[in-house]
Amino acid sequence: MSAISLYLKWGFKFEGKISRGIMVNGKYYDLYYMGRTIGW
């Protein structure tokens, strides 16, 4: 199970994406911003 699917299972939603937002060992990866509303 990937981290993204785990966050979706816990009720998080996609809020944004930065394409090629980070480089690790010469390879670019996308960054995803996710958030969840906390209800009282």
Image (tube, rainbow, N blue to C red):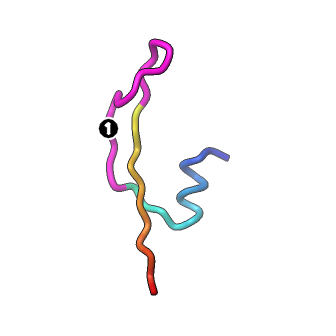
Rendered position, 38 above or below 18 = below
Occupied quadrant, residue 19: top left
The residue at the far right in this view is 1
Residue lying at 52% horizontally and 67% vertically, measured from the top left: 11
- Region rendered in magenta: 15-29
Number of numbered discs visible in the structure rendering: 1
Q: Residues within 10 Å of mark 1 (few under 14, many from 20)?
A: few
Residue under circle 1?
A: 18
Residue lying at 40% horizontally and 44% vertically, measured from the top left: 32
Rendered position, 39 above or below 11 = below
On the rendered image, what quadrant is the C terminus found in? bottom left
Residue lying at 53% horizontally and 59% vertically, measured from the top left: 8
Q: In the image, residue 2 lies at what x, y percent?
A: 62, 44
Q: In the image, residue 9 lies at what x, y percent?
A: 59, 62
Residue 17 included in the magenta stretch of the image:
yes
Q: Nearer the viewer, residue 8 or 22?
A: 22
Q: In the image, residue 23 lies at what x, y percent?
A: 41, 21
Rendered position, 14 above or below 18 = below
